[in-house]
Amino acid sequence: MNNPQAAETLRQIFMRAVDSARPGPVIPPALPDKPRGRCVVIGAGKASAAMAAAVDAAWPDVDLSGVVVTRYGHAVPAGRIRILEAAHPVADAMSETAALQIVESLHGLTSDDLVLALISGGGSALMALPLPGLTLGDKQAIARALLHSGASISEMNLVRRHLSAVKGGRLAAMAHPARVVSLIISDVPGDNPADVASGPTVADGSQPADALRVLERYGIAVPEAVRQVLNVGDRAGSERHSLPLSEATFPGSPASSSVEATRSYSQVDDRRGEARLRDNSPTICEVRLVATPAMALNAAADAARQLGLTPLILGDAIEGESREAAIVMAGIAKSVKQYGQPVSGPAVLLSGGETTVTVTSGRAGKGGRNTEFLLSLACALKGESGIWAIAGDTDGIDGTEDAAGAIISPDTLARGRACGLNAADYLDAHNSYSYFHATGDLLITGPTLTNVNDIRVILIA
């Protein structure tokens, strides 16, 4: 197999994973029964606009309205549902405006109404409303520090929940007494609904002190206002789902029992991608996972088989430092090539999840976790013949650049040297995007309008 053939094979497998999670096909089968009253659609995330368009098309006969917010450049027309755009990965003023408009859309609901919450990755930044006592600037400072700290997505979203007036189930509380159904495209390892977009309709049992410990663990400077909010919440002994500050901010918010209902959900049924509440709360809150990393990896595995390759899924929730994860996977790929273990070639090693990049120097260049993974993988493989790889974020944007990721081949390092590049230096400077831009190996998809986290495919011929 030559480089062009291998690259095309990798692209086909990667795009099959992306296509399996597109909102158009996955949203209609997951819709609940139509309401007796009206349906208000709310949502936040990189896939939310496409999800809203699918709802609008599927329910032409329902009294439908609503507001969702997506990333700049990810908007699509959604008929009766208003689409807003805001910044990612750090919130901007439009993130706050969007949150307020979404809250406003929930006023005056009745028990005959349905609130359809369309939640996907990126919603934490796109819908940002600080708790009383905090400013958007406070949240932005914390977000920037967390992004460079090496904290996992679960840890970052834990902090975000405790600084937000709409996360951690608070948004569901505001919909009382309407029925709430959340359709979620998961981008988090483990598919915990409370972690996707920091769980605006799903509360968790964490405490403010837990968020403070995350900030201290990574040596993040805590603004005094943030420390006061977290300390006050902890001293009050208020659980996340009790929402005292949220109710004070938005008069008329419901009793906390409606959000209490969002805490208990069953394990995901892989066949239906659905999780339902198990209690008897008067407010019905359902969580339905319509697309997940595991589903995308299964689609990639099917594509590999159709291409005559044996797939091995290493896991859908891989975390840790990008460069370290790459070294581990390089060792597995070499074992497949040399010994046919743990799978015989020709084969592909598939994995999902979200690795992290800890920026340890002040001269960090351009890059994302997927391009950093690939540059580290290339360095570890040292030009090993017969091994290629692709890694990319399924939303089409790896970090803050315009590429989803990149592709490496056995001659990646040699071609870099021909361009005057030292791969190890670029890796140490977290400048992987620039390296692959110079070698012409970036994976450019544009916004895919979905997000089931990263997909990595290593091909061993």
Image (cartoon, grey):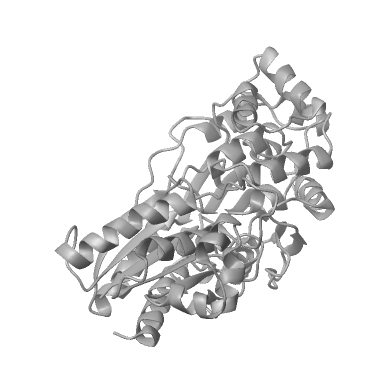
Name the image quarter holding residue 334: bottom left
Which x, y percent locates residue 397?
60, 66
Which x, y percent locates residue 237?
65, 14
Name the image quarter holding residue 63: bottom right
* Apparent side of residue 437 relative to residue 25 in the rendered image (left or right): right
Residue 452 visible? The answer is no
What residue sits 42% from the left and 63% below the top? 379
**Closer to the camera, 125 or 314?**
314
41 w.r.t. 344: above or below: above
* Apparent side of residue 430 relative to residue 315 in the rendered image (left or right): right
**Closer to the camera, 104 or 452?**
452
Which x, y percent locates residue 117?
61, 51
107 w.r.t. 344: above or below: above
**Closer to the camera, 194 or 72?**
72
Q: How many marks?
A: 0
* Apparent side of residue 272 relative to residue 59 in the rendered image (left or right): left
Which x, y percent locates residue 10?
39, 76
* Apparent side of residue 152 relative to residue 347 in the rendered image (left or right): right
What residue sits 25% from the left and 76% below the top? 461
What residue sits 21% from the left and 63% below the top? 336
Q: Quadrant of the N terminus?
A: bottom left
Residue 100 visible? The answer is yes
